[in-house]
């Protein structure tokens, strides 16, 4: 479900401006301050809140805030891409010595680009390169590990027969 919501983005909300709000929480006025990858956005938010509480003007113009929001969203997206690649390469490294082994899996994605499964022991995701016919998201399937590529982060499975 979380995958279907997609990633968030930083946006500037002005007073009396019509905005959709946080679509996942279904609230209009929302901010948070928790994750280490959000330290700069947190700093911007804290500066804005401190100025508002003290009755001072905002420390940023609307144009600056829009630029900061775009920049923070781009940086968070870049960090997510790196994290995803590291996870994929780590899975390929972990499974490299297990070519030919079979695993129980669940289909996590199916599109024109391919069909992906997640195995549970060890937890890893990979693409089915042989035997994707008839598979859909949520299906349970038995797969055989046929190839890994650590540098590219590829983990390839074939649908196991029988």
Image (tube, grey):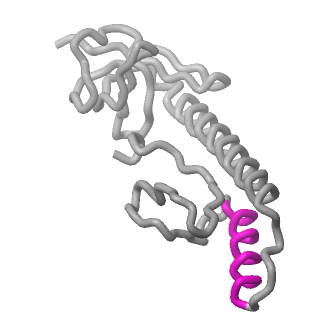
- Look at the image and say whether residue 51 sits in the magenta stretch: yes
Q: Is residue 153 left or right of residue 48?
A: left
Residue sticking out furthest to the bottom: 54
Residue 137 drawn at (x, y percent): 28, 28
Residue at position x 44%, y 36% from top? 124
Residue at position x 69%, y 71% from top? 45
Residue 56 drawn at (x, y percent): 80, 85
Report the quarter where the N terminus lies: top left
Report which quarter residue 111 is drawn in: top left
Report which quarter residue 122 is drawn in: top left
The rendered magenta stretch, by its main secondary structure, is classed as: helix
What range of the chain is rendered magenta?
A: 38-53
Residue at position x 61%, y 62% from top? 13
Q: Is residue 46 left or right of residue 127?
A: right
Residue sticking out furthest to the front: 16
Residue sticking out furthest to the left: 162
Q: Nearer the viewer, residue 107 or 147?
A: 107
Residue 113 drawn at (x, y percent): 46, 15
Q: Nearer the viewer, residue 60 or 98?
A: 60
Q: Is residue 80 left or right of residue 91?
A: right
Residue at position x 73%, y 54% from top? 66
């Amino acid at each position: 479900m979380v995958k279907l919501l997609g990633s968030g983005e930083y946006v500037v909300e002005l007073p009396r401006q019509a905005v959709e709000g946080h679509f996942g929480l279904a609230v209009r006025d929302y901010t948070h301050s928790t994750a280490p990858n959000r330290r700069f956005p947190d700093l911007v938010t804290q500066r804005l809140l401190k100025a508002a509480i003290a009755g001072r003007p905002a420390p940023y113009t609307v144009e600056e805030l829009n630029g900061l929001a775009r920049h923070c969203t781009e940086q968070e997206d870049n960090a997510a891409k790196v994290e995803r690649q590291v996870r994929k390469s780590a899975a390929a490294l972990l499974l490299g010595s297990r070519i030919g082994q079979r695993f129980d899996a669940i289909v996590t994605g199916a599109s024109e680009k391919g069909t992906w499964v997640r195995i549970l022991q060890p937890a890893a995701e990979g693409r089915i390169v042989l035997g994707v016919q008839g598979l859909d998201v949520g299906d349970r399937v038995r797969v055989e590990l046929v190839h890994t590529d650590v540098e590219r982060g590829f983990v390839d499975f074939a649908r196991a027969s029988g």
